[in-house]
Amino acid sequence: MSAPSPEDNVPGADLNRTQAAILGAYAALIDELGTDDVSFRLIARRAGVGERTIFRNYATRIDLLLATAAWIERTIFVREYSSSVFDMPLAIREAMETYDQKPELAHVVAETTMRGVSGAAPSPRQEYLDKMLRREVPTLDDVDRRAIVAALSHLDSAATWVVLRREFGMNRRDVADAAAWAAEAVLDPIRERMG
């Protein structure tokens, strides 16, 4: 049986060219300037559209930020999905290293979920992890499966990178090691049960 495809539930996968240009321009400007210094005029100029076009597609700055965070996750922080839940520690390690390469963008993605911005998907890979666990460990009860999915989903996020990197001041390697180690600790009880 093949691994479940997470792309089926990706928000914003059906963007038109104008929307993609706006989101790409905003992400590039955030990466260069940070979020505070990016005006709609600057986004419009970079995207090659008028300011009204931005407002027609994204009525508020929050709408634009949410769409951009989803776009960043889908296009900049792209990574291979594991075929096994037991490969998640390695995938999480790689994700942490990728977030460290684009810290401003990682912070935007994390902020939309950490602040509970309406409409933000806190864990786009949650359903994917649940399907993998159901397939690989069918004897796992619902309570344990939900706990494992919650823990891995949290670890597999830009929010975890922000906490470890910016709040604890850990370096790139230590962040990747800590997140991967934590994922291993979550999965160890399942490994023990499976023998």
Image (cartoon, grey):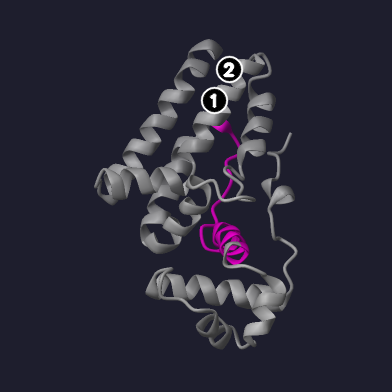
- Is 44 left or right of 32, judged from the image as shown? right
Residue nearest the observer in this picture, 138 or 48: 48
Q: Residue at x 74, y 34 (%)?
A: 1
**44 falls in the magenta region:** no
* Separation of marks 1 and 2 at Cα, in angstroms: 6 Å
Q: Is residue 28 above or below residue 47?
A: above
Count of labels in the image: 2
Residue of label 1 = 148
Q: Is residue 182 above or below residue 50?
A: above
Residues packed near mark 2 inside 10 Å, few (<14), some (14 to 19) or many (20 plus): few
Q: Main secondary structure of the magenta part?
A: helix
Q: Position of residue 63 (x, y in %)?
A: 63, 63
The local secondary structure at tag 1 comes to: helix
Q: Position of residue 177 (x, y in %)?
A: 32, 39
Label for residue 54?
none
Q: Place residue 180 in its image quadrant.
A: top left
Task: Tell me the amino acid under the disc marked 2.
Answer: Asp
Q: Place residue 64 in its image quadrant.
A: bottom right
Q: Is residue 104 above or below residue 113?
A: below
Q: Position of residue 14 (x, y in %)?
A: 75, 64
Q: Is residue 60 above or below residue 135?
A: below
**69 falls in the magenta region:** yes
Residue stretch in magenta: 63-85
Residue of label 2 = 144
Task: Tell me the amino acid under the disc marked 1.
Answer: Ile
Q: Residue at x 32, y 43 (%)?
A: 164
Q: Position of residue 51 (x, y in %)?
A: 62, 84
Residues packed near mark 1 inside 10 Å, few (<14), some (14 to 19) or many (20 plus): some
Q: Residue at x 42, y 28 (%)?
A: 184
Residue nearest the observer in this picture, 142 or 68: 68
